[in-house]
Image (cartoon, rainbow, N blue to C red):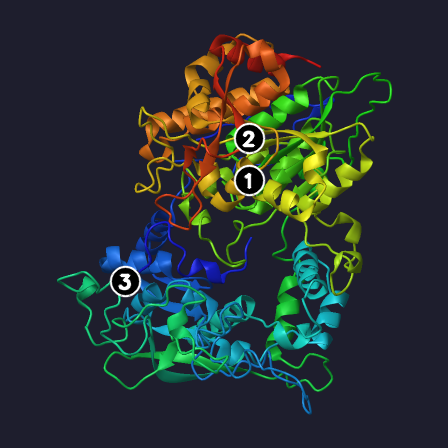
């Protein structure tokens, strides 16, 4: 029901054809290429969920287990109704029918406590004040869930009714800790322990439940017993109920512009009833004011509620109501499934074959730190602030290839609200490891734009979610697994020192924040030193630094800002192709317009590398030709491979029309290093940024002569020099 690129339901979740390099390629300081298997994500070659379902289900009788949103399977049912007869049964983890959420309840005899989710049907801890009825999996796509529930296929629902009765208790945790004889058991226990150790309060054992794994157990037991003619379940009590999925709110048939299935249509989509459970107000977000009840902390919205009803719309389905107890009085485990779970994980018969030494024979858990003590002169201190687009990784490699006498890269800040999800920091660590620079700190920035809700996605939704967007950037278009694996990874490890409720096992591995990296670098500077910053993403991190550190401006010598598009008399357009109404904005500015305004209208010494200049550095033919004529180094080979892949994708599919946009991002790094060598032409302009929360105008840059502050704008440069110097730098063996 939501629009393409929207985030009506996704904001409830707390945030945040490539080939291979030759196996003999050496990375950095004579480190061998680490093969990581042939199976990996490959753009335009990755099978879709729909194709996998078509191939599997058309082959014969199939059981389907759904442990997330129902979008993929609902689309399959609606587009291939003739294959429904091959689906024997659907097992669903999700929803809450008669459930009473046990979390968020006040302790007995408490004098000052406000109950939160206590007694709710649902578990939306991010939105219980507006919707106390929904469960995450159903709330993520309520109408898809409705299609599945009413498909006519036999269904067993394992809702919160049952999963709330099988919390992870301390006895189970301790037994799990004592029984880890397989890789699977060790991996699962470490994941569970990390969840416990990083839990935000001391209520882990009453707030963390068996969800998906319990569903798998119930499904397997039912399938086994049905086959043997027992028709019971070993792990859960089951009963039949009349249930439907509510996708809107009373009063039904209210036309307020929130419901895309009804509003503005002469014919209701899918032939739905105008007074049914789909025709009311649709929750527009987790803070929707329509859902709030004055004087109460419990909302009234029911989007995603798996409600027990008696109307003709009801689906008659089997529902798990309670986890069965363990009848073995000598066992410390109080649930029958706990015992089966630990036995299954520790079975050597079906254990995985993972062996890191066998799979990665060259792998060494070693950190590579360069020795610059003998260098008499070290270049200017630089921090790069990036959002991990393909161009950013090329820029990073280029900066790492620059002589230390010119550039001393002190740190990397990651924007979590740009072209990659923040966990892609792992790729940055791998690039640094490849280049022998494990000494460089990497800081995680915010995942939302300045001035927007922590759980919102006001601007991040303009990034394409699938091909050509997040799915490609997060994997570096399938090439991330071609990089050597760094011992440093993105981690949830934390410590009391940094405000965590408790220290984890390895707090020293904690992922530092962007502001912490900034402070650390600033404190280590000599008195005469200042920092140069290169930004190649949203300006969120830099704005937070300037706003949070009153001395930041005096320490920043210059800021090179890659991004922005200045509206001119030629009426040239911006590059935000996902928002047609915004003709003049550039992505980096629109992803956080308030941050852009904070920085570009500040007193900082800023050099802007705008879209008009980036487009002059965005020729695939030119960069590929230049790389073809330089020596093959690991860096030049990797960049050449990436460029070939992006160019090939651009030619093959319209989803990749914007690939040359990433080429221009490298211009900022090259100008920072080469300066006058690329024969730059600069103009000084006074500008203003539009940041008024209107998506059709936000992020636009206009000339404003009344603004007392100005920026230097790179308007032109020698293209020949630019491409040659990029290629020559990557081709140097040093």
**Of marks 2 and 3, the one in the foreground:** 2
Residue at figure coordinates x 76%, y 37% from the top left: 521
**Nearer-the-camera pick, 301 or 564:** 564
Q: Residue 313: x and y, percent?
A: 25, 78
Question: Which residue matches tag 3?
Answer: 84
**CA gap, disc 2 and disc 3:** 54 Å
Q: Is residue 569 left or right of residue 160?
A: left
**Nearer-the-camera pick, 524 or 314:** 524
- Label whose residue precedes the other's in the sequence (2 or 3): 3
Tell me the quarter of the image containing the C terminus.
top right
Q: Quadrant of residue 206?
A: bottom right
Tell me the quarter of the image containing the N terminus.
bottom left
Is 159 located above or below residue 708 in the figure?
below
Mark 1 residue crowding within 10 angstroms, few (<14) / some (14–19) / many (20+): many
**Of marks 1 and 3, the one in the foreground:** 1
| Residue at disc 1, secondary structure | loop
**CA gap, disc 2 and disc 1:** 8 Å
């Amino acid at each position: 029901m939501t629009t393409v690129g929207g985030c009506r339901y996704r904001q409830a979740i707390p945030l945040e054809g490539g080939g291979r390099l030759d196996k003999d390629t050496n990375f950095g300081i004579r480190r061998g290429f680490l093969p990581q298997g042939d199976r990996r994500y490959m753009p335009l070659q990755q099978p879709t969920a729909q194709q996998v379902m078509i191939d599997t289900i058309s082959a014969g009788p199939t059981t389907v287990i759904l442990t997330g949103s129902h979008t993929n399977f609902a689309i399959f049912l609606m587009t291939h109704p003739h294959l429904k007869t091959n689906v024997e049964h659907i097992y669903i983890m999700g929803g809450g029918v008669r459930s009473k959420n046990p979390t968020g309840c006040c302790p007995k005899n408490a004098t000052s406590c406000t109950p939160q989710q206590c007694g709710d049907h649902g578990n939306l801890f991010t939105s219980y004040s507006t919707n106390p009825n929904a469960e995450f999996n159903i709330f993520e796509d309520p109408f898809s869930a409705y299609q599945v529930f009413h498909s006519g296929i036999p269904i067993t629902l394992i809702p919160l009714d049952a999963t709330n009765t099988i919390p992870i208790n301390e006895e189970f945790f301790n037994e799990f800790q004592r029984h880890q004889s397989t890789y699977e058991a060790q991996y699962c226990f470490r994941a569970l322990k990390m969840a416990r150790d990083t839990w935000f309060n001391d209520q882990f054992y009453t707030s963390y439940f068996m969800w998906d794994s319990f569903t798998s157990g119930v499904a397997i037991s039912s399938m086994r017993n049905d086959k043997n003619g027992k028709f019971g379940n070993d792990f859960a009590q089951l009963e039949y109920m009349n249930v439907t999925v509510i996708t809107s709110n009373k009063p039904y048939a209210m036309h307020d512009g929130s419901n895309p299935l009804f509003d503005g249509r002469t014919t209701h989509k899918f032939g739905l009833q105008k007074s049914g459970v789909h025709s009311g107000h649709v929750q527009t977000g987790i803070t929707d004011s329509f859902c709030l009840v004055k004087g109460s902390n419990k909302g009234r919205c029911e989007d995603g509620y798996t409600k027990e009803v008696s109307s003709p719309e009801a689906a008659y389905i089997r529902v798990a109501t309670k986890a069965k107890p363990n009848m073995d009085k000598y066992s410390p485990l109080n649930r029958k499934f706990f015992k089966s779970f630990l036995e299954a994980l520790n079975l050597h018969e079906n254990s995985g074959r993972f062996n890191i030494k066998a799979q990665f024979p060259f792998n060494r858990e070693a950190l590579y730190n360069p020795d610059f003590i003998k260098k008499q002169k070290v270049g200017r201190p630089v921090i790069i602030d990036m959002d991990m687009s393909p161009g950013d990784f090329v820029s990073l490699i280029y900066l790492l290839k620059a002589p230390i006498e010119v550039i001393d890269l002190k740190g990397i800040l990651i924007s979590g609200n740009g072209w990659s999800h923040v966990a892609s920091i792992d790729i940055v660590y791998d690039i640094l490891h490849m280049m022998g620079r494990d000494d460089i700190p990497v800081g995680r920035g915010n995942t939302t734009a300045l001035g927007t809700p922590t759980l919102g996605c006001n601007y991040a939704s303009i990034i394409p979610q699938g091909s050509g967007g997040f799915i490609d950037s997060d994997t570096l278009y399938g090439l991330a697994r071609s990089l050597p694996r760094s011992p440093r990874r993105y981690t949830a490890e934390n410590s009391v020192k940094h405000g965590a409720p408790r220290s984890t096992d390895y707090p020293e591995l904690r992922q530092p924040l962007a502001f912490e990296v900034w402070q650390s670098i600033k404190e280590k500077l000599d008195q005469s030193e200042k920092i140069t910053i290169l930004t190649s993403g949203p300006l969120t991190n830099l704005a937070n630094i300037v706003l949070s550190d009153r001395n930041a401006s005096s320490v920043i010598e210059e800021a090179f800002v890659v991004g922005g598009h200045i509206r001119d008399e030629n009426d040239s357009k911006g590059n935000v192709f996902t928002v047609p109404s915004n003709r003049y904005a550039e992505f980096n500015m629109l992803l956080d317009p308030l941050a852009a305004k904070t920085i570009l209208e500040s007193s900082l010494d800023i050099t802007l590398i705008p879209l008009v200049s980036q487009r002059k550095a965005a020729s695939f033919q030119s960069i590929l030709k230049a790389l073809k004529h330089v020596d093959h180094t690991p860096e030049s080979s990797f960049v050449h491979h990436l460029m070939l892949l992006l160019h090939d994708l651009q030619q093959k599919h319209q989803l990749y029309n914007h690939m040359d946009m990433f080429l221009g991002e490298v211009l900022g790094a090259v100008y920072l290093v080469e300066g006058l060598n690329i024969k730059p032409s600069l103009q000084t302009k006074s500008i203003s940024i539009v940041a008024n929360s209107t998506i059709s105008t936000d992020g636009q840059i206009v000339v404003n002569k009344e603004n007392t502050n100005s920026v230097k704008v790179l308007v032109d440069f020698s293209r020949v020099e630019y491409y040659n110097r990029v290629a020559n730098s990557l081709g140097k063996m040093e």
